[in-house]
Image (spheres, rainbow, N blue to C red):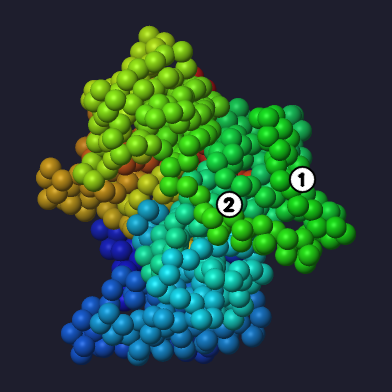
């Protein structure tokens, strides 16, 4: 059980660092909105009870001579964290919400009393409504996250069953406390017979993007570990913000589902927000719309049945209409069910028809090896579809495609666009497979294995305009499926992020003050918005850990605050990073900036592990001013930027952007 590890870590940093996390700038919080302040006695009562429940768990572990499993710990801790967050950020919006907190603590205490070695009675063999949790492995933090389950009455736990993943709508006040309470009492809008329904939390209100996207992935993985779920029979469905999530997640991860059904929501940025060209943001931000704008991933939806739903009079019918246009542009027709006479809700008979369609699709599932695969992307953040993988793009943020088809025994037909290298693995044995790719034909001679237990894979790359087989995997620094930017990618699903605070002192007072304020702002914002706790360490602590690890590559991403004078780890790595510091300036790509007035922010492959990131002076680049609509929670900075910090940070930025741009495919500086 956790014992306020985040607070202990922060106190340690504040005591040992000369540049420390300071007071956050006065930027009004949008998510979650500020609720009422509890009477002091009520707050103390809840805090005391949380502490006693943790003590009870620790005592039980000692007496029973066993340690809670990771799943057991998450299944209990999620209730305590929900109340702690509610207390910290004033997430009580009605006097009745106190009863919700009590109900959650009652359940936590009950689970502590019931738990035993290999025994979790709240979930083992249970049907009905269940709240479970997992400890993230892919996300930037390791804070237990909740999800809801609906297990049908009389469920056969031995038989593989379908899984329906339901994405909820926007709820500004539906924080952990309220989400969990709802999942303990309400089955939701769908309960298909013979299927388990999973309700991801999605980090509450970020449109199921960034860590909210990773939450869907990890919740599904955790449910699959606990239950006998047929991986070929997973359905994705959602409405409103959940519909936007279903559009986004379904298009980016189509291979994980047998069907996807988005209801309402939004599918892109500019038209949904009714932006006029004169109101468009900088060109780099427009390029970054290609991270989540679903029309950029339309062809991925050709890999599975996609059934949109809209109310006839719903303004959010716009999402499906835009996707209808995108399908037509690619020579296909989108199936679009419209609920007659209703606005922003499901019309009962149309919902009944939709669920019948999905039930029929789920009964069959998708084939293990589809004979035809379509991959469309603009970034190697999303490089995979069934047995096709984009290994390297000609240029990021440009429409990129791989269309592949099995055309006979051991024969594959492939066409590509903006792809420099790719891998194919439809067969267990790839040697001897004939591949016709664009205008070239080749026979696989030496398929490669990337790791133990992985299937043999044909790796192809383009040389001099023609495709050839790779006989060994490429080396050298380049954008790939692990590291590709932009800055916000470090805070999505590449694993744990360690925040590295400086213990030295910058020569520039303005830089020290900005680092102090902005680091605290980002720390608090992550807790409030993303419902988790990033690990915080000093530069000295990380340097000591790296020294002890010796040749073992660390599995962490590092967020370094400060400059080369204040942050010892940054000083240690400066020759391996693209920023060069001098007495009064710093430079990037041959251009110099005044170090007294500007700071560099960037993302780059970590010198300690090339499959992980180092981020300099930045957390999430979208801020409070972008939280009013999920469609605006998109990256605001590319791979690097120079910020003028004489302009105060506000709800829209950490300073004035002097210049910003992308690194090229080899992580070198290029034009804006």
Query: Relative to 371, does residue 220 appear above or below in the rendering?
Result: below
Q: Which residue is mark 1?
A: 318
Q: Most extreme residue toward the front, as rendered? A: 409
Left or right: 363, with 389 as reference point: right
Q: Position of residue 52 (x, y in %)?
A: 36, 88
Name the mark nearer the viewer: 2 or 1.
Answer: 2
Q: Position of residue 9 (x, y in %)?
A: 31, 64
Quarter in which the N terminus is drawn: bottom left
Q: Residue, x 58% and y 35% (percent of image)?
A: 299
Q: Which residue is mark 2?
A: 259
Query: Relative to 541, does residue 201 appear above or below in the rendering?
Result: below
Residue 461 visible in the picture: yes
Left or right: 623, with 13 as reference point: right
Q: How far, Cα to Cα, is label 2 from label 1?
A: 21 Å
Q: Please, what secondary structure does the residue beneath circle 1 have?
A: helix
| Residue 670 position by quadrant | top left
**Mark 2 / mark 1, whichever is N-terminal:** 2
Q: Position of residue 345 (x, y in %)?
A: 76, 62
């Amino acid at each position: 059980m956790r014992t306020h590890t985040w607070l202990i870590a922060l106190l340690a940093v504040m005591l040992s660092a000369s540049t420390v996390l300071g007071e956050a700038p006065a930027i009004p919080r949008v998510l979650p909105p500020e609720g009422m302040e509890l009477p002091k006695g009520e707050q103390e009562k809840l805090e005391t009870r949380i502490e006693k429940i943790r003590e009870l768990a620790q005592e039980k572990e000692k007496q029973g001579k066993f340690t809670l499993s990771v799943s057991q710990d998450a299944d209990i801790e999620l209730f305590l964290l929900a109340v702690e967050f509610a207390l910290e950020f004033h997430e009580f919006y009605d006097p009745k919400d106190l009863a919700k907190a009590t109900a959650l603590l009652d359940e936590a205490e009950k689970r502590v009393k019931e738990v035993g070695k290999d025994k979790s009675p709240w979930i083992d063999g249970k049907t009905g409504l269940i709240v479970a949790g997992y400890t993230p492995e892919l996300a930037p933090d390791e804070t237990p996250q909740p999800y809801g389950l609906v297990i049908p009455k009389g469920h056969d736990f031995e038989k593989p069953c379908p899984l329906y993943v339901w994405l909820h709508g926007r709820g500004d006040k539906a924080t952990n406390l309220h989400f969990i309470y709802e999942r303990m009492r309400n089955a939701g809008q769908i309960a298909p017979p013979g299927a388990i329904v999973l309700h991801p939390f999605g980090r509450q209100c970020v449109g199921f993007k960034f860590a909210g996207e990773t939450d869907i992935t990890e919740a599904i993985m955790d449910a699959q570990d606990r239950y006998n779920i047929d991986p070929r029979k997973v359905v994705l469905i959602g409405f409103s913000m959940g519909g936007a999530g279903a559009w986004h997640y379904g298009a980016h991860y189509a291979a994980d589902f047998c069907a996807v059904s988005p209801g309402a929501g939004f599918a892109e940025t500019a038209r949904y927000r009714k932006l006029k060209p004169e109101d468009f943001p900088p060109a780099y931000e427009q390029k970054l719309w290609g991270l989540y704008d679903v029309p950029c991933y339309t062809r991925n939806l050709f890999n599975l049945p996609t059934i949109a739903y809209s109310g006839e009079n719903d303004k959010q019918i716009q999402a499906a209409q835009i996707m209808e246009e995108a399908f037509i542009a690619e020579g296909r027709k989108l199936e679009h069910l419209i609920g007659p006479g209703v606005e922003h809700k499901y019309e009962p008979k149309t919902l009944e028809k939709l669920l019948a369609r999905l039930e029929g699709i789920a009964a069959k599932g998708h084939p293990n090896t589809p004979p035809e695969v379509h991959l469309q992307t603009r970034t190697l953040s999303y490089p995979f579809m069934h047995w096709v993988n984009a290994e390297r793009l000609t240029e990021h943020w440009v429409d990129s495609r791989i269309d592949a088809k099995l055309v006979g025994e051991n024969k594959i037909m492939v066409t590509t666009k903006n792809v420099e290298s790719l891998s194919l693995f439809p067969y267990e044995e790839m040697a001897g497979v004939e591949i016709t790719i664009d205008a070239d034909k080749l026979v696989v001679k030496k398929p490669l294995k990337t790791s133990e237990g992985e299937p043999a894979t044909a790796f192809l790359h383009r040389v001099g305009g023609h495709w050839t087989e790779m006989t060994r995997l490429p080396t050298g620094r380049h954008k790939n499926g692990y590291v590709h930017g932009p800055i916000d990618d470090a805070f999505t699903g590449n694993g744990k992020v360690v925040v590295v605070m400086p213990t030295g002192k910058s020569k520039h007072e303005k830089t020290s003050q900005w680092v102090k304020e902005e680091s605290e702002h980002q720390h608090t914002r992550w807790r409030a918005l993303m419902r988790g706790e990033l690990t915080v360490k000093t530069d000295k602590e990380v340097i000591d850990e790296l020294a002890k690890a010796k040749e073992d590559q660390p599995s962490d991403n590092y967020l370094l605050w400060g400059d080369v004078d204040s942050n010892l780890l940054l000083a240690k790595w400066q020759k391996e990073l693209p920023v060069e510091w001098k007495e009064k300036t710093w430079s990037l790509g041959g251009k110099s900036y005044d170090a007294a007035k500007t700071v560099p922010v960037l993302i780059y492959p970590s010198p300690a592990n090339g499959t992980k990131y180092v981020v300099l002076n930045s957390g999430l680049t979208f801020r409070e001013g972008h939280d009013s609509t999920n469609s605006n929670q998109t990256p605001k900075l590319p791979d690097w930027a120079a910020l003028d910090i004489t302009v105060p940070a506000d709800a829209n930025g950490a300073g004035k952007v002097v210049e910003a741009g992308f690194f090229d495919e080899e992580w070198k500086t290029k034009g804006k």
